[in-house]
Image (cartoon, rainbow, N blue to C red):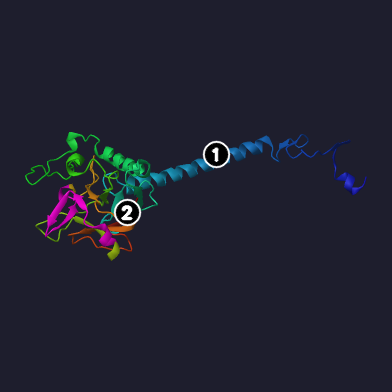
Amino acid sequence: MSASTRGKYEVDGDKEAPKGRFSFMYDSNAGTCFGRTPRSWLLITIFYTIYYACLAGFFAGMLSVFLFGVIQDERPHLTGDQSLLRLNPGMGFRPQPQPESSVIKFTAGKNATYQKYVSNLEALYKEYKKAVEPINLRECGDNATDVDPTKVCAFDWDKQMPTVFGYAGGRPCVVLKLNRIFGWLPDPIDPAVPHPTVRCVGENPADNENLGQPDYQPSLGANGTSSGYFSQEYFPYLKQVDYRSPLVAVVFKNLPRNTLVMVECRLENLNNAVYDKADRQAMVRFDMFMQE
């Protein structure tokens, strides 16, 4: 028998059994399946069961240390200057149906062009109109006696904000919201105005001319100018149940047609908020474009 012939056969006593192409899957002569005997398969199954059980237990233990030993329900792990915001608040704005876009583009009187913006504002309105448990509320105002910081002041949208958003009549409303920073308290520059104020201007002189003087709700006025403000009574934020961030509505009543206006809204009257346009701190920007 030639060498090539011998490679195709196994000798078992006086028998020669041909080796098929599937003999690796099951070899009746050696009693193996995929190269292992049943005893070998049993031992390796037991080994890997114990190995992965120990690995899963180690992972669960480390996760438990992280969840219950590091993260707290009552406060963030990193606060103050250690947090990403570093006690320097920023702002967000609505409507923003697409988070990646800061352009508000519409045609006054054409519902299809601005309905997405109105819907976005209505969703925010509904969120603020959700019932707040009385047990979580405290008295607010100058004569308040309950100053428990673990309770919240109710933000009454219907009293402080517009309920009609003005896009149909060419007077669009944009809502500004101060970012939540755990434990942050405003430090006003002017003691007579004990609130963070906000004012919207054009990014460039031409934008400023096109923008005109917006209206704010709630607002403060002095020396013929006005600005919005975030009431001091809503701070500090301590992860209170039913907490609602204060809002300011800005109504642009003099927008020109077919002109892109770049708007920048800045926090003012604060010693502990540093304006930084590059990092978008203590400010927010967006673009307004009202078509014919």
Q: Which residues are magenta?
A: 207-233
- Left or right of residue 281, residue 34 in this image: right
Nearer to me, 258 or 143: 258
- Left or right of residue 251, residue 289 in this image: right
Place of residue 42 in the rendered image (x, y in percent of width and height, measured from the top left): 62, 36
Q: Is residue 229 above or below residue 48?
A: below
Q: What's under tag 2, amino acid-wise? A: Arg
Q: Residues within 10 Å of mark 1 (few under 14, many from 20)?
A: few
Q: Is residue 15 above or below residue 189?
A: above
Location of residue 198 by image quarter = bottom left
CA–CA distance between discs 1 and 2? 71 Å
Residue furthest to the right in view is: 1
Q: Is residue 279 above or below residue 152?
A: below
Q: Quadrant of the N terminus?
A: top right
Q: Which residue is mark 2?
A: 257
Q: Which residue is mark 1?
A: 49
* Residue at image point 78% right, 35% down: 29
Nearer to me, 90 or 95: 95
Location of residue 116 by image quarter = top left
Quick check: can you spot residue 107? Answer: yes
